[in-house]
Amino acid sequence: MPIDGEIFKQLGRAAAGAVSVISAYDRTGTNIIALTVSSFATLSFDPPLAMFAIQHNADSYASLVESKAFGVSLLDTAQVEVARRFSCKGREKIEGFKFDQGIVANVPLIPNALAHIECSTDQNFPSGDHAIIVGLIEGSRTREGQPLLYFARQYGTFKPLATV
């Protein structure tokens, strides 16, 4: 018998995750869709694969599941407002925001992110009330900085432990 929903929520709050914005073009190829996730993970070294999960009731669900490519922008601690902006529903979150463009794949990316990852969609499959989308990494760039993390419903950063 599975755990109940309240216990599951407590479990989710106990797990820290890096904050990313997943972005792509919708089915028309002209409108950008973007959402904040903490479920991004690298998956495989050979071939280089990454994945994220998206809830079925997300407003960008259909577009991301059908997308041929997507971008991942791993956010910096200075980008808390970007994370909040793209965690909301609705098209308004895109209005007035200037995206960078992928170099290898035709994907929108968040300027000044710690990492830009350009993926072609490799697989997607339903799992519970989410879909898991797997991408083949075709391009990436990183820069120095501190990652934005999400833990216990709060944004924060990484602080190394003192070494002995």
Image (spheres, helix red, strand yellow):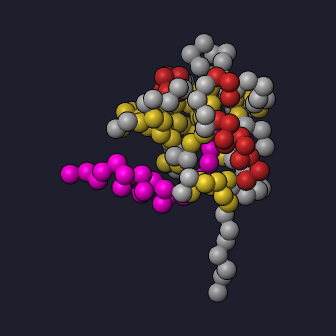
Q: Is residue 140 visible?
A: no
The spot of residue 58 in percent (x, y) is: 50, 30
Percent position (x, y) of residue 66? 49, 22
Q: Position of residue 57 (x, y in %)?
A: 45, 29
The reply to whether the magenta stretch includes residue 7 is yes
Q: Is residue 43 visible?
A: yes
- In this view, the residue farthest toward the top is 28
Pick the front one: 135 or 74: 74
The image shows a total of numbered marks equal to 0
Residue 69, located in which quarter of the rendered image? top right
10 up-or-down from 75: above or below: below
Boundaries of the magenta span: 1-22
Left or right placement of residue 85 versus residue 44 in this view:
right
Which residue is found at the position 25% from the left and 51% from the top?
2
Residue sticking out furthest to the bottom: 164
Residue at 54% in and 26% down = 60
Q: Out of 75 and 136, give the one closest to the viewer.
A: 75
Q: Is residue 24 shown in magenta?
A: no
Residue at image point 66% right, 63% down: 158
Q: Residue 100 in the image: x percent, y percent?
A: 77, 32
Left or right? Give the position of 1 relative to 82: left
| Quadrant including the C terminus | bottom right
Question: Residue furthest toward the left?
Answer: 1
Residue 30 falls left or right of residue 69 = right
